Amino acid sequence: MKLKSKPLKILIFTIFKKAGCNKAEAERIAEYLTKASLVGHDSHGVIRTPRYVDMIKDNHIVTNVKPKILMESNNFSIVDGLDGFGQTVGPFACKLGIKKAKKYGNSIIGIKNSGHLGRIGDFSEMAAEKGIISVHFVNSIAGLLVAPYGSWERRFSTNPFSAGVPIKNKKPFILDFATSLVAEGKAYVAHQGGKSIPKNALINDKGNDTNDTSVIYGTKDPNAKSSRGGTGAFQPFGLHKGSGLSFLCELLAGAVTGSGMGRDNKSQPFRNGMFSIYLNPSKYVKGKEYDQEIKRYIKFFKSAEPNKGVNQVLMPGEKEIHNEKDRLKNGIPMTKITWDAIKDTAISLKIDSKLINKCL
Ligand SMILES: NC(=O)c1ccc[n+]([C@@H]2O[C@H](COP(=O)([O-])OP(=O)(O)OC[C@H]3O[C@@H](n4cnc5c(N)ncnc54)[C@H](O)[C@@H]3O)[C@@H](O)[C@H]2O)c1
């Protein structure tokens, strides 16, 4: 099935408003979740709605927080998210990093105690729109999912990495991925009957490659709520390389920010830590030469002969642009199970069925 993005965004906004978020927070959550679905990252899109609402109900997240700056210098800050929504904490910290980089040339912002930050590329895009280069390392405490290279036991979260570089008169370079071979949400989409994941995306407790998502959720039930029940793990991307990058995310986003590194504590709610570097290129490079060199390289990069079955060589960020164009026009694809779960959440909050039906 395909859902219309505009009414879907209104429905998601209404759900979070009814669940206890103020208007601005509900708007932000709806904007970020719908955007992730539009650009093709269904794993971090509207599929998250029921889980987020359950977190409010279970007091695992605090609505409407005003993030607190714990430590500050000209170009360094630690932001305490006070256990609030990542869609509130993330943009607050990102705006701070951009403001400091605009003024001082560069900045580093750490986030601790934040709810799920969603699609990290949103922050790379936000900075790039203001002419700022950014690099983001993310970890999570109490979200153990990924085995280090050489093991099947969970020691990392899916620890995403993202970077954005603005490009004059063009869409920015946006690199944004989980350091696991697939993001958790992609396994969840597969668990709910959506697109399947590669055969070596997961590893079972015998140390064998698998794509059987019950090793993560501990059940075949498509409505499994927690990824903590399984006995297997996700595999890092790129063998020892992804495993090493994930460890770096733990060090920067977990230790340096004070957010905490991964731990085996199933009773603790999921929290993201983020370590971000912001750089204002206009303070450091010769504008014309810099822009021309990037333009030349993009042309050279894109001129690489595509392999059989590949239409064109894509820059990081291009796929998402194509997806968004297509999905704005043709709708957001969704499995019936995912849509039913969103509908049930809306119905449980006594939302007018007209708002629900408009999405179809
Ligand atoms: N908050 C969290 O804790 C958390 C954890 C994990 C992942 N995430 C988010 O999940 C999302 C999905 O991550 P993922 O690992 O599934 O991403 P992915 O594997 O789809 O990779 C996406 C990146 O690869 C680029 N890309 C994709 N196809 C390409 C192609 N054919 N040619 C060139 N480049 C291409 C994209 O432009 C993008 O930069 C991300 O937005 C990430 O931030 C968040």
Image (cartoon, rainbow, N blue to C red):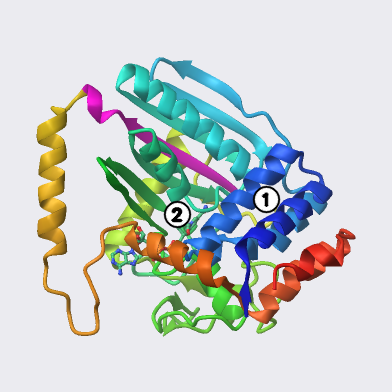
Disc 1 to disc 2: CB gap under 8 Å: no
- Which residue, as the protein is rendered here, is positioned at the far front? 329
Residue 247: x and y, percent?
A: 37, 51
Name the mark on residue 268: 1
Q: In this view, does 23 lie above or below 313?
A: above
Name the mark on residue 32: none
For label 1, the SS is loop
Is residue 167 shown left or right of residue 91? left
Q: What amino acid is found at the position of numbered circle 2 in the picture?
A: Asn
Mark 2 crowdedness (10 Å alpha carbons): few <14, some 14-19, many ≥20:
many
Res. 338 visible in picture: yes
Residue at the right extreme, as displayed: 350
Instruction: Answer left or right for 132 relative to 47.
Output: left
Left or right of 232 in this view: 243: left
Q: What stretch is highlighted in magenta?
A: 270-283
Mark 2 CB near ligand 1 (8 Å cut): yes
In three-dimensional space, the C-alpha distance between marks 1 and 2, rounded to whole angstroms, equals 17 Å
Q: Hey, which quadrant is residue 133 in on the image? A: top left
Which one is in front in this view, the residue at disc 1 or the one at disc 2? 2
Figure check: 350 above or below 133: below
x, y (%) of residue 300? Answer: 9, 58
Number of other residues with Cα within 10 Å of mark 1, as a class: few under 14, some 14 to 19, many 20 or more: few
Mark seen at residue 159? 2
Q: Which amino acid does label 1 sit on?
A: Gln
Is residue 243 magenta-colored? no
Q: Up-down: is 315 above or below 90?
A: below
Give whichever of 44, 184 is nearer the camera: 44
- Quadrant of ligand 1 in image: bottom left
Front one among 113 and 103: 103
Q: Quadrant of the C terminus?
A: bottom right
